Image (tube, rainbow, N blue to C red):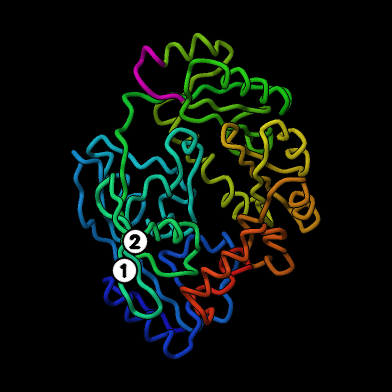
Amino acid sequence: MKEIRPKSAAELSQALREAAANGQCIRLGGAFTKDAMGGSVRDAAVSISTCTMRRVLAYEPKDLTVSVEAGLPYSELTALLAAEGQMLPLDPPLAPVSTVGGVMAANLSGSRRRLFGAARDMVIGMTYCTLGGDIAESGALVVKSVAGYDIHKLLIGSFGTLAAIASVNFKVAPAPERCRTFVLSHSSAAGALESRSLLARGALQPVSVDYLNPAAAALCGLESHAVLVRASGSERLLGRYARELPAAEPIDGEREAALWAQVNDLAPAWLGGHGGLAVVKAVHPAQDLPKIAGAVSGPVWSHLFIGVTRLACRDLAETAQALSSGCAALVEWSDPARRQGLDLWPAPGADFELMKDVKAVFDPNGLLNPGRLHGRI
């Protein structure tokens, strides 16, 4: 397979145009750290990586905006922001090795989505390259802009099946004064739901509230059915959390950072080091958590205030059981070497026809990352 690493948007657009003109299927990515997500690219003749496009194009700390090329390592972006007391609270898995473009293409976010939103809420603009060789812009580098269409929202989560992301403009957030996580232990998932209800009725506004079943908790150095309540703010505010959650174990500093890094990487860790086959992502009402969590014997973790649960599966039968748990579900992660035979997205929904129409507009011949969007597009 021919490999191309363009160094600019102009070179990226040229590489796409030439491959499309020759009718070649294209494997598009950055560092390709997300190959275990979505589906496998079919019949690619050319591999195009944006990993050498890694410049910071503009950064205005006073305006809380930054523009970077797609190949910039995500860890370098967060370090740049941290030096100015700012952050991009996405919490993607594999953050130390991911590129910004890869995080956007896979639409990755973590438990802080509850307070800050997902990638679509933080991206205010994007430059992208099409198979026709065009370099187009969507949005701007200002937070309040009404210029043009929000095409960048289509590209976020498209797994590179529509166009190639060249650069991304973000609105960033001030970093909090202090952070602390309070760990509540329960004997069952039902007990975890009771804690969620108490927090939902209270005056406090946690950054996130996550649930780990015993198998997932053990991978993170915890025990039992654990509820992680992440809080940020002044020491006085964190003290109130301690008073209202007297049974919780407080964790902060380096230990807290290490804990959340483990939580963020549960899916790739399960596939890479524990013989797992797949991780199913399910979207459901909060009260259904005990039933859904019982569908598998392995790790289960959930963003309790978002209604997203992930179930780790060891084999085909367990994966099929997780997918048929009575909620919207798909295989988000799977072992590429054992992916054959998996139906990654059994029920894509009524809007799938619209998704295919959008694909036909951007890529009528199906040349760009075919099969990458969970085997369907």
User: Where residue 352 is drawn, which disc sits there?
Assistant: none
Give the magenta range: 231-237
| Residue at position x 62%, y 62% in the image | 352
Q: Is residue 374 left or right of residue 62?
A: right
Structural crowding at the residue carrying mark 1, measured as other residues with C-alpha within 10 Å and reported as few (<14), some (14–19) or many (≥20)? some
Rendered location of residue 153, percent (x, y)? 43, 56
**Residue positioned 78% across, 43% down in the render:** 295
Q: Find residue 140 and report its image quarter.
A: bottom left
Amino acid tagged 2: Ala
Q: CA distance from mark 1 to mark 2?
A: 14 Å
* Viewer-proximal residue among 343 and 21: 21
Q: Please tell me which residue is depicted at 39% across the width and 71% down the height of the picture.
A: 49
Which quadrant holds residue 286? top right
Residue 92 visible to the viewer? yes
Question: Position of 49 compared to 316: left or right?
Answer: left
Q: Which residue is mark 2?
A: 70
Residue 38's spot in the image, x, y percent? 58, 61
Q: Secondary structure at mark 1?
A: strand
Please check the rendered image and state whether residue 344 is part of the magenta-colored stretch, yes or no: no
Quadrant of the image for the C terminus? bottom right
Which of labels 1 and 2 is toward the front? 1
Labels 1 and 2: the sequence-earlier one: 2
Depth check: give the residue in front, 359 or 270.
359
Q: Which residue is mark 1?
A: 136
Dividing the picture into quadrants, the one containing residue 218 is top right
Label 2: few (<14), some (14–19) or many (≥20) C-alpha neighbours in 10 Å: many
Instruction: Indicate whether 160 appears above or below 276.
Output: below
Point out residue 82 in the picture as x, y percentages from the top left corner: 28, 39
| Residue 291 placement, left or right of 285 | right
Q: Nearer the viewer, residue 287 or 358?
A: 358
Q: Amino acid at mark 1?
A: Ala
